[in-house]
Image (cartoon, coloured by chain):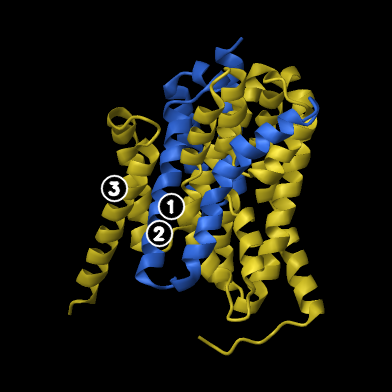
Amino acid sequence: MSGALWPYFLLIVFGFLPSEIWRWLSVILSHGIDEGSQIFTFLKTVATVLLVGVVARLIFAPTGELAHVPLAARIGALALAGGVFAITRRNVLAAVLTGEAAIIAAGFWFLR
Amino acid sequence: MSQIVELTPADRRRWFMEGVRQAFTGPAYFVAVALIGVGGLARAAGFPAGVAVLSTLLIWAGPAQLLFFGAAAAKTSWLAVAVSVSLSSIRFLPMCLSVLPMLRTPGTRRSTLWLAAHFVAVTVWVESLRRLPDIDRPARMPFFFGFALACILTTSLFTGVGYFLVAALPPALAVGVLFLSPVYFLATLIRGARAPVDWFALTAGLVLAPVTEAFVGGGLDLMALGLVGGTAAYLAGRWHEARRAEP
């Protein structure tokens, strides 16, 4: 294989295939599952908990630049976003923009 | 369930465009900005820009892409990269399994489901669970493809932009990029929570995440969290329902 195509080969064999296999498996397994069935609710709950776990890790044990912002500032920005979210009756955009403004301000403060 | 009516091609196009439109009310931008960092990481690992963009089109999973380029940069063995990428993507199994039954009609072809499954990622999953129940079943598939395509193509573009730009980003803005996904996902999950079991799931995830992270190793902690926390939340939901049903 020529050198220029090698990175694409690596991506497909060691990135795409190991990840995609779960989506393929789901198509095979999804046949007997109905929306509204108990197994559907169970799988949705497992997926939700998994996602919350990923989110919790991104906030409490982050990587990269975010790790240099103190935990209290990360939680503070999240709390501000939550407050705006509650006041605006669950407006995601308003909450995200508030949290972003807070964390970027904290970033300028702590990463000077 | 009510009778399934086939859509005309014009209706299908209309619902496809409605999906595109709703994606551009926010979600397409959120996921695109959240994955800007992937481009920079790919460049740091010495990959060409084409591989960075293709990684979004093919893998379409932020954590798996970060793992792939991050591990490649750290010169991890390729087998270890494949294993960790695969572990991080196990979540697609329950995610796809809880979206595909919403999209399927008796006439849906298997090949359409394969394609739909490829587009399921966190953002598309969260938004689908929230938006699809309000849409008539035959209209869901075109809506889903419009929504998902808008998300994945916008994100691919941003991955390419990130490849050339991210190194120039000031640290404070990089912080903002990294903080975007957690805030966005938490907000959408809470907004989408309807039944008590959804609230149990959110609580279980937040409470148990530090526990499994501390006590379960080998990259399996998230899977353990999903299974243990998910089962607990599911049982709590059933218990709550049964109690409410009593006179």
**Residues at badges 3 and 2 in contact (C-beta under 8 Å)?**
no
Q: Quadrant of the C terminus of chain A?
A: top right
Please state the chain letter of the residue tagged with numbered disc 3 in the rendered image: B
Provide residue B155's location: percent of width, then percent of height: 72, 42
* Chain in yellow (letter): B
Q: Is residue B200 left or right of residue A22?
A: left
Distance from disc 3 to disc 2, alpha carbons, whole Å, reads: 12 Å
Residue B205 position within the rendered picture, expressed as x and y whole percent measured from the top left: 36, 44
Front residue (pair B40, B182): B40
Crowd tier of the residue under label 2, counting other residues whose Cα lies within 10 Å: few below 14, some 14–19, many 20 or above: many
State the mark number for residue A43: 2
Assign a secondary structure to mark 2: helix
For residue A52, say whether it is visible: yes
- Disc 2 to disc 1: CB gap under 8 Å: yes
Vertical placement of residue B231 versus A51, above or below: below
Residue in the picture at 37% in, 36% down:
B220
Q: Are marks 3 and 1 on the same chain?
A: no
Q: Amino acid at mark 2?
A: Leu
Q: Nearer the viewer, residue B228 or A101?
A: B228
Residue A109: percent from the left, percent from the top? 57, 15
Amino acid type, label 3:
Val
Residue at numbered disc 1: A47
Give the labeled residue for mark 3. B228
The N terminus of chain A lies in quadrant: top right
Q: Quadrant of residue B15?
A: bottom right
Mark 3 residue crowding within 10 angstroms, few (<14) / some (14–19) / many (20+): some
The number of callouts visible is: 3
**Residue located 54% across and 70% down the image:** B102
Which element carries disc 3, helix, strand or loop? helix
Chain identifier, colour blue: A
